[in-house]
Image (spheres, rainbow, N blue to C red):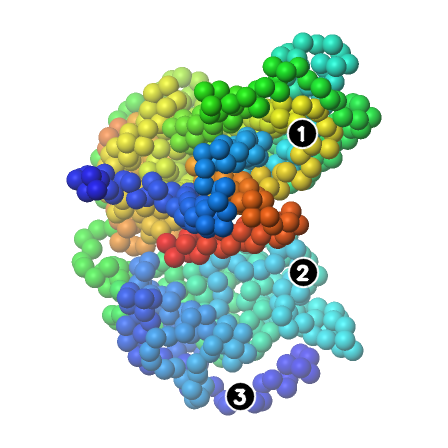
Amino acid sequence: MSAHLAEASPGRPAETAGLSVRGISKSFGPIRVLEDVSLDIRPGECLAILGENGAGKSTLSSIIAGVLAPSGGTMTWCGEAYAPRSPAEALSAGIGLIHQEMRLLPELSIAENVFVGRLPMSGGRIDRRQMIQRAEAQLKRLGLDVPATTLVGRLRVAAQQQVEIAKALTLEAKLLIFDEPTAALGGDETDRLFEQIDRLKAEGVSSVYISHRLEEIARIADRVAVLRDGRLVAVHDTASVPVRQLVEEMVGRSVDRLFPDLDPPSDRVVLEATGLTSSEGAFQDIDFTVRAGEILGIAGIVGAGRTELVRAIAGVDPLASGRITVAGEPLRLKSPRDAFDAGIVMVPEDRKGQGLLLKQTIEDNIALGNFDLVGRGGWVMPAQTRRFAEGAIASMGVKGRPEQRAGRLSGGNQQKVVIAKWLARAPKLFIMDEPTRGVDVGARAQIYDAIAALARSGMAVVVVSSDLDEVIGLSHRVMVLSRGRNRGIIERRDVSHVAIMERATT
Amino acid sequence: MTTEVTSPRAKRNLLPRIAFGGVAGPLIGLVLLCIAFSFASQYFLSIRNALNVLDQVTVLGILAIGMTMVIIIGGIDLSVGSVLALSMMSMGWLERMAGLPLPLAMVLGVLTGAACGLVSGCLITFARLPAFIATLAIMSVARGLANLLTDGRQIVGYPDWFTNLATVRHLGFFSVTVTVFVVLMIVAGIFLRYRATGRNLFAIGGNPEVARLAGIDVRRYTILTYVVSGALAGVAAVTLAARLDSSQPSAGLGIELDTIAAVVIGGASLVGGVGSIAGTLIGVLIIGVLRNGLNLVGVSPFFQMVVIGAVIALAVTFDTMSRERK
């Protein structure tokens, strides 16, 4: 390790105290988002913070990382009063925030990203050699084997996240806050991240872990804190708390069940796919059918070709070969329009990038793609749009008014808008790619109910998900993809984590 | 006031409608300007002067209609000034050198503009050039061609019926060119608000991928939008030729920037997805009233540029701030 780093360490007292948060509150105008939260984060532990969207998790982590100033309360860090006025101050005190969305400069190298704003200088010039050496030392510490001169834009999302971590580590961070770090990661990458957090833990680095994925908590966290409506409602000294109990604490009421009961599907085949092969090599030779009233889950690790497969069926990406029939009619898909004229609609994986116009109103979003139903002869009158949107909103139970901007809704409500938009077309096949990504637990159950209701009404439904519990709880049958091939379709009575993972990792 | 009897429902609908596209702010600005100039100059507040302002903004206004659509889909069209010049020269050249009847030459002039838009649109969609670069290239090419046609000379002396289009006020009111401008504004306003195709343009500007997944043929609409912008530059060229009684290869130099300014003052966002014809009309009138009023007060043209620049910065600042507060 370089001389520069060695200087930085001895100044700090031995890790005894960690971070204590005392009575922290935060208001935005009249709205209180955090109320009197007190928490301790001990040296070398991983504390999970759970809560629904809007519970105050991100606000709390922003306060700890110096992004926001609290309205009240105090913090101490390593035995000293701690009130960072900026993220830079927090970082130099040893507290780093790993954002949910990467904040990196894609056109710069890893080393430059790690040192941006504090490039090592020598003789008035940037000391590139030192910069690259120190960045590589941290990458090695994370078990990442890429040269520090690689452009960040060339890295995969998972590797980009590691660069963020490396950046915090070069500043001798003693506390890392991970805000939904696995939202964009696949199974393998998630495992690797957990190994890194474990390794850092062993080195005495504490972490705060914020996630929606409850199943991850037991794996990674030592203790669990639950926030609800800005208040701390529970702190568990162990992470092995039953998921159901955590959910109930998060939503503040008892949850009988997360997944709805499924009715048996009919025998009528809606979608028959044979020999589907991607023109970009993402999947080969895939055969399957979906019947009316049936929910087919598609599982697999990231990169298995799940999203690419459903995008091709929805007419978004081209197929190299294969045959798709809907209700016996063979299809030629050249555009999304062809697909939904044939009765296939899709709720895409990336809601903000592909599903919704965030700056436009709910009614504009619902009317988009449905103008043929809203008006006649290409005319679209505001009153008709309003009525159309009100109908769709009511049918999905969206909490919002037609004239509200879509970007202002919670993740769950946004997803309902995307689903509602297609309902009026009475589609035959409804494809959902990651339907609950970024959606909090309370709203999740409602989306599951909605999906089950679609099936009950006689639609064929395809659900792609990285969340195994979701695929298992929601599907009549589960198709497992791995490296672009169909590794088998598992019936509901036989499905289990093990059964899926065995096939997914072949 | 009688409006007080309206039902709560109607009131609720009216407010967001006025606020939509940020028209309220620019409108207040325009009214304040008019009030200020009414005090500063005794000639400002008259029907005659109002008609003058309309005459003066006709060319800018017609260009701004196309620019509004281009900006709504998240694009930009830097070529409108040069395309205007090329259309104007084509019309003149076809009439004078090729001996075509003037009405036919007028139509071909407009088509020349449309063809330029078609090229821009194809460069943007098929060659995947950024709109800024594609239209910058066309801007240079069209200006060059406009000069090449007559080796840089102007074409003077059109028939009386043609110049009358811009100068004779029918029923003591609108000239033909101003009527064309007003009708185009109304048609475009209705198109953007009540036609499915118009609504689709907002979706494309909001997020082209969302629009594509919703079944919109983004490429086709993008090309068509630039074709419309080019064709409107052609229409603006004909009205300008009528007003000047000549075709000049240097016409419309720099007017693309005034056009963009008018659209942006009217509340459109250069990021795309936001904008309205009503806003653009107000933006065009703000620029027109400023020029007219400052002239009446006797401010030098150089200082006028300074004032207009300040107004652009002010207008967009207010717009951004009011958006953030919402």
Q: Residue at x 57, y 26 (%)?
A: B232
Quadrant in which the C terminus of chain B appears: bottom left
Q: State the image coordinates of residue B114 (x, y, percent, origin top left).
A: 62, 23
* A464, B281: nearer the viewer: B281
Q: Residues within 10 Å of mark 1 (few under 14, many from 20)?
A: many
Left or right: A94 in relation to A248? right
* Secondary structure of the residue carrying numbered label 3: loop
Horizontal side of B297 relative to A69 (left or right) equals: right
- Dot label at residue A12: 3
**What is the spatial separation of the Cα atoms under label 1 and label 3, in whole angstroms?**
68 Å
| Amino acid on which the number 2 mark rests in the picture | Ser
Of A482 and B271, nearer the camera is: B271
Q: Chain of mark 2?
A: A
Q: SS of the residue at dot 2?
A: loop
> Taking A247 as reference, is B206 above or below it?
above
Q: Which residue is mark 2?
A: A109
Question: Closer to the observer: label 1 or label 2?
Answer: 1
* Residue A395 seen in the current view: yes
Residue A132, position as x, y percentages in the image: 70, 68
Residue at 48% across, 45% down:
B42
Q: Quadrant of residue A319?
A: top right
Query: Which of the 4 image quarters holds residue B234?
Result: top right
Give the spatial CA distance, label 2 vs label 3.
Answer: 31 Å
Closer to the camera in the image, B325 or B206: B325
Label 2: how many Cα within 10 Å (few below 14, some 14–19, many 20+): some
Identify the residue position indicated by label 1 in the image: B83
Hey, what amino acid is under mark 3?
A: Arg
- Residue at the spot 43% in from the left edge and 30% down from the top edge: B189
Residue occupying image coordinates x 50% and y 90%: A13
Q: Nearer the viewer, mark 1 or mark 3?
A: 1
Estimate the spatial distance between the alpha carbons at disc 1 and disc 2, rounded to whole Å. 43 Å
> Would you place residue A415 above or below residue B79 in this image?
below
